[in-house]
Image: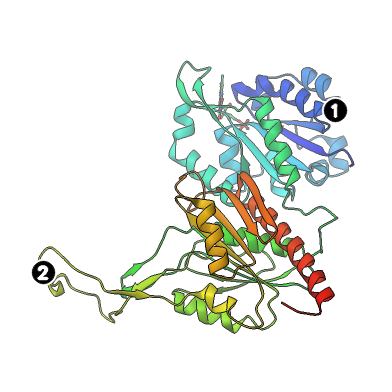
Amino acid sequence: MAQQTIVLGISGGIAAYKAPELIRQLIGSGYRVIPVLTSAATHFVTNATLTAVSGEKVRQTLWDEDAERAMGHIELARVADAIVIAPATANVIAKITYGIADDLLTTIYAATQAPVLLAPAMNQEMYRHYPTQRNLRQLRERGVQIVGPNSGDQACGETGPGRMSEPHEIVTAVEAVLAHSSTPSPDVRGSAEGINVLVTAGPTRERIDPVRYLTNASSGRQGFAVASAARAIGAEVTLISGPVSLDTPPGVHRIDVESAAEMHEAVHDRLGNCDVMFAVAAVADYKPSTSHDEKIKKSQKATEEQWSLELEETVDVVASVTKLEHRPFMVGFAAETNDVLQHAREKRLRKKLDVIVVNDVSDRTIGFDSFENRVTLIHDCGEVEIPYANKDVIAERIVRETFGLLTRERKHSELNGSTH
Ligand SMILES: Cc1cc2nc3c(=O)[nH]c(=O)nc-3n(C[C@H](O)[C@H](O)[C@H](O)COP(=O)(O)O)c2cc1C
């Protein structure tokens, strides 16, 4: 494989002293590293050291006439297979969150399509500072990978979160980002062209009255990531989403619904030419037996202390699809808290799913409403564990495994003269 290029942004934090060692380790892992310094970073690490360890001209200013004759900042944005900013100061994190591009590093960030990885490093109060946390959250939602920070003793004499991850941790994160880069490698790009995919995502809302409803903690992130991953390799993707606050992935056709009944209807309206359905939505199992047109008043309660709500089962969207004679290849999702694999295996058979993807939601760091996940994919021929990773990375693996199984299933059907 051709050597990959990392544009390493170094911003003005004390942890910049670790940058030469990080460069050494990245080069040791086979990457070309081009250092880009902010002006504050020059107070912490010298050009001479960085040039010596990287073997590259260190870039520092937008106003380098030689480089800018060839539009150097755009060239660096294009040439990068990944942009790594380590250390990432509170300041640089804020600037890239808001699209400020007033120096070379932030301009490269604004102009790149490459995956971006940040290693935040700062005083623990700065790290806990609400705007810093909000900015990091927003960047994560936009697909930026964040590694660290670690907790411990800090250069300022305080103790807490804010220490930059160690160089070897950053190298591992870079390798993971590049292995699962959202820009598909040439071997899979376009491999799903002609395949029609339906994805359901998010929670549903079951109305009690105009202001109250029953719902669950699904954020929709995993379903949106699956839609995006399928689109990235060329599939035609329709995404049917419950109420979420996420942007529609580029090139994906989105339909918004609210209740389980609406999701059922939207799915069946679009099953016509569907080859694969990923049922990622957390559809409510129960809904209020009566939905009131007007807000229920406190005075309407049965007794002073209690108010009972009568529930009835909602329509089972997945079962309604798998029982069809001409059904798509079905991938269902399960969130379990105990005997995770056993329950998922049983559910796959009971619901007649081709594949079930299960995660353990008793672990609060993954699954519902988090950015990361760890899942097991169970199908007829075996089980595949997809280790802890960002939901985008998990989605790519799920989509690739599924299309691999679909191809095998189609070959098998052709040999046996049957269709799914
Ligand atoms: C001695 C010293 C250490 C600093 N360490 C950090 C740090 O670790 N993290 C951080 O976010 N800012 C740190 N700062 C503040 C930044 O240098 C400052 O916000 C600067 O504007 C960052 O510019 P840049 O983001 O363009 O590199 C430090 C400042 C000084 C003087």
Where disc 1 sits, the SS reads loop
- Which residue is under mark 1? 56
Where disc 2 sits, the SS reads loop
Badge 1 amino acid: Glu
Q: Do the residues labelled 2 and 1 touch (CB within 8 Å)?
A: no
Distance from Cα at disc 2 to Cα at disc 1: 77 Å
Q: In which quarter of the image is the N terminus?
A: top right
Q: For this rendering, which residue is in front, 260 or 219?
A: 260
- Which residue is under mark 2? 303
Q: For this rendering, which residue is in front, 314 or 186?
A: 314
> Which quadrant of the picture is home to ligand 1?
top right
Residue plotted at (48% across, 50% down): 339
Residue 356 location, x and y as percent?
60, 61
Give the image quarter of residue 266.
bottom right
In front: label 2 or label 1: 2
Report if residue 408 is visible in the image: yes
Residue plotted at (81% across, 58% down): 188
- Where 7 sits versus 366, above or below? above
| Left or right: 204, with 118 as reference point | left
